[in-house]
Image (cartoon, helix red, strand yellow):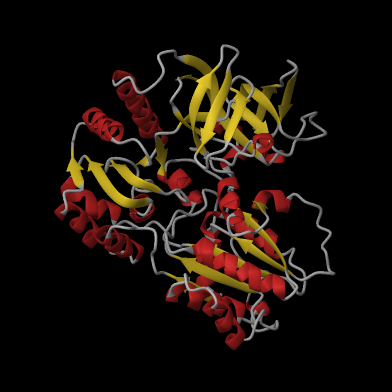
Amino acid sequence: MRQGQNQLKPVLPRQKAIAVTETDAALNLGQKTMIEDVLSSRDRIQGIQGTAGAGKTTALAQIRTAAETQGYQIEGFAPTSRAAKQLEQAGVHSGTLQSFLVRSQESDQQHRKLFFIDESSLASTNQVRDFLRRLGPEDRVLLVGDTRQHQAIEAGRPFQQLQEAGMKTAKLDQIVRQKDPLLKSEVEMLAKGQITTAIESLKSRGRVNEIADPKERVRAIARNYVSAPERTLIVSPDNKSRQALNEAVRRELKTNDLLGIADHKFRVLVARQDMTGAERAWARRYEAGDVVRFLRGSKSAGIEAGSYGKVMSVDAAKNLLTVEKPNGNHVTYDPKRLSGVTVYQAVEREFSAGERIQFTAPQKQLGIANREMGTIENIAHDGNISLILEDGRKIEFSGTAHSHFDHGYAVTSHSAQGLTANRVLINADTTVHPELLNARFAYVSVSRARLDAEIYTNNAEGLASRLSADLGKSSALEFSQSVGISAPKDLGIGQSI
C-alpha cells in the first residue's frame, strides 16, 4: 500500500476537482470535500471512511463521472451481492469480490481502471490481499467502508488495518439519512463511539423498553411491528431470536387477518452462520443433514460448480465428509481440499399471500441480490410465487426449485447492514455473546432508521455498558477460539499489500 502512495497523476488537479463539485448544488460540504480529496489524490490505494447514511452513493456517482471523463474504466465490487447491487445505483457496473477473484488473472493493460470496493469492512484479509495483487501499474482502487460497522466474518479486518498503516482516507461524515434531528444526533453519537450518551438520549425519549421475559419481549416487538408494518424493520443479534421474531410477527399478522388464509409449506435452506470460512475446512463442524453448496466444485471429486450435496456422514478423525449428490451418488472428500462452499440447514416454513420475505442467496436468473426483500402477491397450487420487490419490480419463481428465501420481518444486524427503513425495532438481549451485542450492533441497528428507532431489552440499566463493548480488534478466529472452536491461523496483512 505504501509503495503506491504519491505514485500516480491525480484524476483531476484540486482546482478542477473543486469545479466538478460546484456544478452539483445538491452536494453538501462533506460530500464535496470527500470527492475533491479522492479526485486530487496521487495514491493508487485510497479509502473512504463513510458514516452510515452520509450520502455515499451520490458522492461515488460524481467520482465515477469525473474519472470516466479522464479515460478511466470504472468497475465496482463488494463482498456481498446486495452491496454490489447498491453500488450499481452510482452508475458503476458491479459484481461480488468473490466473482472477480475467480476470474482469469489476465489483466487489461490497455486501459487505466478505477475500482470501487464497497462495504470494505466486510471483506476478509485474504480477499483484499488477493485483489490488490491483481492491480495493473496504472490502476487505482477506492476502498469504501465504515470501520465502526460490522467486519468480515472471515478472519481479518483489512480496511481498518490499512487505515492504521497510513492509507490516505477521505472522510464522509455529514449524515443525511435521518430525518428526525434527535435521532440524527443519536446516530452521530454512536458513530463517534459515544454509546452511553446515545442510549441515555434514547431512554429520555421513551425509546428504550425493558421487558425481562424473552417471550413477552418478542410478542411486544411483534405487536409493535404489526401496528405499522409499512417500511418497518426488526433487528436482532442472532438467528435464533430472528427466527422467533419472524414467527411471532407472522402469528400476529394472521390474527389480524393481514395475511392470506391459505398456508403453503416450502423447504428452504437457512445458512449456518455459526461457521466461518476457516471452520468449513473441518469435518467436525458439519452435521449429518447439512446441505453444502459447492461454489467452485472439484473435477477430481466429481463435484460440479454450483451443485449441492447433503451431508450423510462425518469422519472427524480423518477429516472426511460423505455427501449425497442430487443424482443419488455419494462422494467422500476432505473439506480442507475443497474451498468455496456454503453450508445450509434444510427447514420447513409456511408462507402466505401478503408475506414479507427475504432472499438468503443471490438468484442471478431472477436478478435478485442476497438479502433483497419483497412481498408475496400470490402462491399458486404448483408452488409458483408471485412477488413484488421493494424496488417495485414484479417477479415469479418456483418456491420448490428456489430454496433460498425466508420470512423477512426480522433480520440480524449483520444482514441489516446496507438496509434503510422508516422505523426500526431493535431486540437487544444482553444475555447473548458479546460478539453479537456490542457497539457495532448498536450503531448498525439504530442507523438503519430514517424516522424512528426503538429498543427492546431485558436490562435497560445495563444496556449501555453492554453495548459499549467494542470487539473491533477481535477476529472471527478469536471468537471461534473463545467458544472452543479451533481454526487455521489468519495470514494477516503483510508488506505485500
x 74%, y 49%: residue? 102
Q: Position of residue 118 (x, y in %)?
A: 57, 59
Residue 390 vs 140, above or below: the answer is: above
| Quadrant position of the C terminus in the picture | bottom right
Residue 288 vs 495, above or below: the answer is: above
Residue 333 vs 195, above or below: the answer is: above
Q: Position of residue 382 (x, y in %)?
A: 60, 13
Residue 190 location, quadrant: bottom left
| Quadrant position of the N terminus in the picture | bottom right
Q: Position of residue 144 (x, y in %)?
A: 55, 64
Q: Position of residue 405 (x, y in %)?
A: 53, 30
Q: Is residue 380 left or right of residue 232?
A: right
Q: Is residue 144 left or right of residue 231?
A: right
Query: Would residue 25 be seen by someone viewing this image from the given angle?
Result: yes
x 34%, y 67%: residue? 192
Residue 219 vs 383, above or below: the answer is: below
x 44%, y 60%: residue? 473
x 48%, y 72%: residue? 31
Residue 302 location, quadrant: top right
